[in-house]
Image (tube, grey):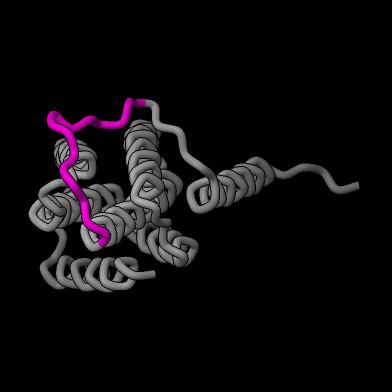
């Protein structure tokens, strides 16, 4: 009879992480999300939205929803890739806040009579792989990746505030709160020791984000 070896717990731990990651992926992509915080409310009522206004708002909110799907994948993979329990807890907490964003954007898309991206499984898988690569490069690089990602998301959300129809105050309130949360995530990662990424890497990240936002705007 084979006797257990010291490596057995490690194999089991890896299997547990794999199962949990798969479960997180399924829930992120296919489940209906519930926010822990109330959906942000506009300080003034929505104006009259034309059919074209609603299509534009829905397209922008779909892009934002995809960004949150990717955020879930990134934080899940980076939490998996670190051996630092404090850092893992930080990633997990950020992911919980991003779940609020998922719920808010899903709710707004329904109100606008639209849907989430049909390519969400692809977006999740790609982001998970990128996050895992960042994690394997070391905690400081992984945190630097979070900083750069969130700074780019902040810029992207600011651009949506300019592009959303003037009468769509509900979407603006959601986007504004999302932006404030992303700024906090970037600041927290910077304080935890994140280092600036090389310029070519930053450029590749912007290119990947451009592809994602362009495609998910329609699909």
Q: Is residue 131 above or below residue 12?
A: below
Quadrant in the rendering for residue 67:
bottom left
Q: Residue furthest right?
A: 1
Residue 75 visible within the image: no
The residue positioned 29% from the left and 53% from the top of the image is 61
Residue 166 visible within the image: yes
Compare residues 69 and 11 and report the one nearer the observer.
69
Q: Is residue 40 magenta?
A: yes
Please provide percent x and percent y for residue 75.
37, 47
Q: Residue furthest left?
A: 162
Q: Is residue 207 above or below residue 158?
A: below
Magenta stretch: dominant secondary structure: loop
Tell whether 117 sits left or right of 63.
right
The residue positioned 22% from the left and 56% from the top of the image is 50
Compare residues 79 and 42 and report the one nearer the observer.
42
Tell whether 133 sits left or right of 49.
right
Name the quarter where the C terminus is drawn: bottom left
Q: Which residues are magenta?
A: 37-51
The residue positioned 31% from the left and 31% from the top of the image is 39
Please provide percent x and percent y for residue 123.
41, 64
Tell whether 64 sits left or right of 158.
right
Tell whether 142 sits left or right of 119.
left
The residue positioned 77% from the left and 42% from the top of the image is 4
């Amino acid at each position: 009879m084979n006797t257990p070896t010291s490596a057995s717990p490690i194999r089991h731990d890896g299997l547990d992480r794999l199962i949990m990651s798969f479960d997180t992926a399924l829930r992120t992509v296919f489940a209906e999300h519930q926010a822990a915080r109330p959906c942000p409310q506009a300080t003034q009522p929505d104006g009259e939205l034309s059919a074209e206004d609603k299509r534009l708002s829905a397209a922008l909110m779909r892009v934002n929803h995809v960004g949150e799907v990717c955020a879930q994948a990134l934080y899940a993979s980076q939490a998996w890739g670190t051996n630092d329990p404090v850092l893992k807890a930080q990633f997990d907490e950020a992911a919980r806040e991003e779940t609020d964003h998922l719920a808010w954007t899903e709710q707004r898309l329904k109100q606008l009579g639209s849907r989430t991206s049909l390519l969400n499984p692809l977006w999740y898988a790609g982001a998970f792989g990128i996050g895992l690569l960042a994690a394997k490069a070391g905690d400081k690089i992984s945190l630097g990746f979070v900083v750069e990602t969130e700074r780019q998301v902040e810029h992207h959300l600011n651009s949506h505030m300019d592009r959303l129809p003037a009468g769509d105050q509900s979407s603006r309130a959601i986007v504004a709160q999302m932006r404030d949360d992303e700024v906090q995530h970037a600041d927290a990662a910077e304080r935890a020791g994140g280092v600036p990424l090389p310029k070519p890497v930053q450029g590749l990240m912007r290119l990947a984000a451009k592809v994602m936002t362009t495609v998910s705007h329609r699909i």
